[in-house]
Image (spheres, grey):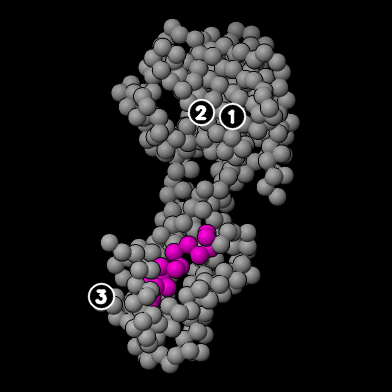
Amino acid sequence: MSVPQDHDAELLAGGGIAAVVIRNKEEILRRFCDRVRKTLPSARNEAHPVLVDTLPSYITRLAMALRGVDDIEYATKSSNIAVQHGDERARFTRYSLGELLKEYQIIREILMHLLRAESKPSDEEWRVMHRSVDEAMADAATAFVDVHDQFRELFTASLTHDFRGPLSNARNFVELMRRAPDGGQREQFSNRAVQNLDRIARMIAGLLDASRSNVGERLALDPAECDVRGLLNEVLGNLEPAVRQRVQLAMPEDITAYWDRDKIDRAVQNLVDNAVKYSATDSIVTLRAIETHGRVQIAVHNFGEPISPEDQPTLFRPFRRTFTAERSGKAGWGLGLVLVQSVAEAHGGGVGVESSATGGTTFTLDLIRDVRDLRNQSE
């Protein structure tokens, strides 16, 4: 078993145009990183290992194609190097498709300058070089677009998942409003219906914001001062009356945080909905919030069938549901916890889970109390 770079010594010893490429590999990498940092806005703050990505292997494969090793007609033949490059640019950087393609233009210009200066390529060698760049560009672009298509599909499905709760609540309040005997109750139910419709409007705004983000990038935040007790009471207030009776809020003291309130609301709502859905019908669900060391922990606990250790690693993967959830027969997309995790990460935290037959199941949002601290650290 070998990797492309294992061929470098042999290619160098063999001489010719392939040796020219290998001998100048480090110089090609240096020029490439310098050029992309100067010309591509999204590359300016990326670390060297991220920028070079699969380029060292690609350069070796190009030399192999120029040498005709193993009938390699162009650099990416029988290799996914360019696919890997496009995939990683989509997932781990803020690159646009145009910037990805510009990288290959830069590679072509560097190679042309180098080969003209140190060799006299034949027409066939020029053809191999250009085809190697063209094929790699096409493969990388296809992979880049595929990742973004998957992201858009995931986000649209995620939004659909989130729509169901407030839409159902709004409908219920409208129905209650129709049946209410007096004007005071009708006004109360009307206000609650409007609140839920407003939540849907904010979700749409979130979709428009996230559609401009790359996969792997933190959700954009709109932080403001947030009364945590008020936020949690609002979440509970949106529950159906029968469900609300089963949920208890345990909060020893008031907490003022600096968060994106709408996103935290959505995350907590998901956790509470799941806790109610997968708990015994006569059991109590507990929502708890505490502050410690500049962080806030919001925990949701329920008693029900525990989440097995085998299922726990897949909880935060999209479209993956636990065996217990599938067996329950209850509808679900396997997306709620993905959204919870994204919100937690954007607030400098994460989501913990503990589950056992005797102790029940607890999901804990562990967040930085003031996300302005997170912003200052990242600047």
User: Magenta span has 170?
Assistant: no
Q: Mark 3 points at which residue?
A: 70
Q: Which of marks 3 and 1 is in front?
A: 3
Q: Mark 1 points at which residue?
A: 366
Quadrant location of the N terminus?
bottom left
Q: Name the residue under label 2.
A: 352
Q: Are marks 2 and 1 in contact (CB under 8 Å)?
A: yes
Other residues around mark 1 within 10 Å, as few (<14) / some (14–19) / many (≥20): many
- Measure the alpha-carbon separation of dots 2 and 3: 50 Å
User: Magenta span has 53?
Assistant: yes
Which quadrant holds residue 221?
top right
Counting residues from the N terminus, which is met first, the one under dot 2 or under dot 1? 2
Q: Where is residue 48 in the image (x, y as percent from the top left)?
A: 56, 62
Instruction: Establish if 49 lies above or below 370.
Output: below
Counting residues from the N terminus, which is met first, the one under dot 2 or under dot 3? 3
Q: What element carries label 1?
A: strand
- Measure the alpha-carbon separation of dots 2 and 1: 8 Å
Task: Decide if residue 254 is in sight here.
Answer: yes
Q: What stretch is highlighted in magenta?
A: 49-63
Q: Is the magenta stretch mostly helix, strand or loop?
A: helix
- Measure the alpha-carbon separation of dots 3 and 1: 54 Å
What amino acid is at disc 3?
Asp
Q: What element carries label 3?
A: helix
Q: Which residue is drawn at 48% across and 29% down?
A: 164
Q: Which residue lies furthest to the left in this view?
A: 71
Instruction: Establish if 268 lies above or below 379.
Output: above
Instruction: Establish if 168 lies above or below 80.
Output: above
Q: Nearer the viewer, mark 2 or mark 3?
A: 3
Q: Is mark 2 on a helix, strand or loop?
A: strand
